[in-house]
Amino acid sequence: MTGAPRETRVLDAVVSIVDSLLDDFDVVDLLTGLTERCTELLDIEAAGFLLADPLNKLRLLAATSEEARELELFQLQADEGPCVDCYNSGQPVSVADIHGALERWPRFVPAAIDAGFASVHAVPMRAAGIVLGALGLFGSRRGELNDADLLVGQTLTHIACVAILQEHAPTPSTVMPQLRSALTGRVVVEQAKGLLRQLLDVPVEDAFRLLRTYARANGEHLTDVARRLMTDRYSRLLIVTELDELRAGPL
Amino acid sequence: MKGWRDDVPDEPHGHHCGRPAPVRLSVAIHEQLRAAVDGQRGTEAADRLCEACVVLLDVDAAAISIVFDGASSGTLGASGEPARRYDELQFILGEGPCLESVARRIPVLVVDLADPEEARWPVYGPAMLANQIRGVYAIPVVVAGEFVGALDLFRAQPGPLPDDELTSAVTAAELAVIPLLDLMDGDLQAAVADPHSNAWAELNALSRAEVSQATGMLVAQLEVEPAEALIRLRAHAYATGRSATDVARDILDRRLLLEAD
């Protein structure tokens, strides 16, 4: 992966993601994969997609890490930080050294430093001129997001928009249900993580990995597996038994 | 929410860059919808929210209906007696906007019941036409990932809801979560406990990942459905004077075990 020039790797990534889009895909799963691609293609350590809900709050849709501290950092971004600014302005935000941004983001900066990050960036998610949310990027080293990196970020973000809106033209009556559906899907996945924590006594991060592995092995949508776990008690028993076996093997 | 740039005004949801926004939600409407649920609980908040919809949007009646557990369903809030009648009729007839919206998990937007092609509600449709209602719009209300009810809007004038009104209606459906939670709570303890609660802050807390995770743990521990689990978590938060997020963290860290009934 690291041997080929960056352009080739970006093209490979785009092609494989477009293949997913043409096939049957789960929004939360695809977007999680996109954030992982970001860390491979850009000089950053963590990424997260935030989507605005109907009450105008940015909410986390997918991230590279399910670790509690990083999730907290992403959630904090609902109130303050590069993603909020990016969403409000519709323009990318890039801060090479967050130590200089303490006055601008008094709560976000200490939390980001505490989580081990030194630089933060955000790219807007747009469709038909409407800003739907933002992609947040976090680096453990100081550094700017240059034009080439920005283009990669915008490309991946654009794909995320297409994934969320699917084949519906972005008019309000189609956009709203899609956005709500994506955010509801995330809620159900979070619930499933908690359910598995209880039934398998695993940390919630591991629960997410198990869910994802199971969904892929069975050709099912991540969100659908989560929903079945939460609402179908018969399926729940079967799925949990299989997950218990999965847990014993490599993830 | 403060923007860091002085030259860009603070914009609410779905804001547009540099062009008139089809999905722009007027700050005034957003604020007034929020104000309608703050400082009220349960049925009062639901009624106030419906009244606000009629004032702020170009509709003639509004109601919030609930379909929970199959067993309990009905109208929980309405802008007036006609709205309440229009809404309850669907439960009597077994067909209508809320029922369809919840079953299909999407907004149901009927632009003209008088259209000869429009045949989705063979009994409810004509009944509404007899009341001079031609436009019916239902936005589902989602609690803990479950589609449990809808905000139903009724209009004499046929036609689609304008984009900005649809956005407002979706916002109202989000705000309806709090009064709906109040009313789904079997003993209503949580509902009466704090008349000065901040519905907005509560909605934010309820959308946090750890609250959803704790809800999932409760589903396993108490063997209840997700919406019921969230109600229990919230009731405990009210009973102990703590935030839903704090209670959620205790549940996740296994410092707190809620009792089954």
Image (cartoon, coloured by chain):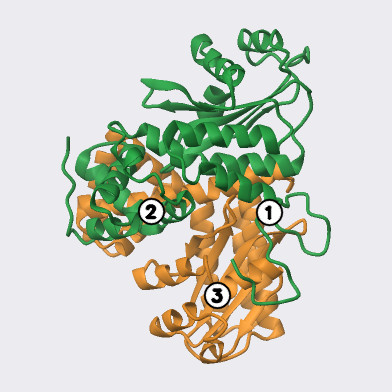
Chain colours: A orange, B green
Give the class, few, some or many, for how many residues have Cα within 10 Å of label 1's Cα (few <14, many ≥20): few
Q: Which residue is mark 3?
A: A81
Q: Which residue type does callout 3 highlight? A: Gly
Chain assignment, label 1: B
Whether discs 1 and 3 lie on one chain: the answer is no
Q: Which residue is mark 2?
A: A190
Tell whether B31 sits left or right of B182.
right
> Residue shown at 73%/48% (left/top)?
A170
Compared with B118, B211 (above or below) is below
Q: Which residue is mark 1?
A: B27
Q: Which of the marked residues, 2 or 3, is nearer the chain's N terminus?
A: 3
- Find residue B63 and report its horizontal and vertical position in percent: 56, 27
Tell whether B83 sits left or right of B111.
left
Tell whether B204 sits left or right of B237.
right
Q: Which residue type does callout 2 highlight? A: Glu
Quick one: B92 or A229, which is closer to the camera? B92
Give the class, few, some or many, for how many residues have Cα within 10 Å of label 3's Cα (few <14, many ≥20): many
Query: How far apart are the alpha carbons under marks 1 and 3?
Result: 22 Å
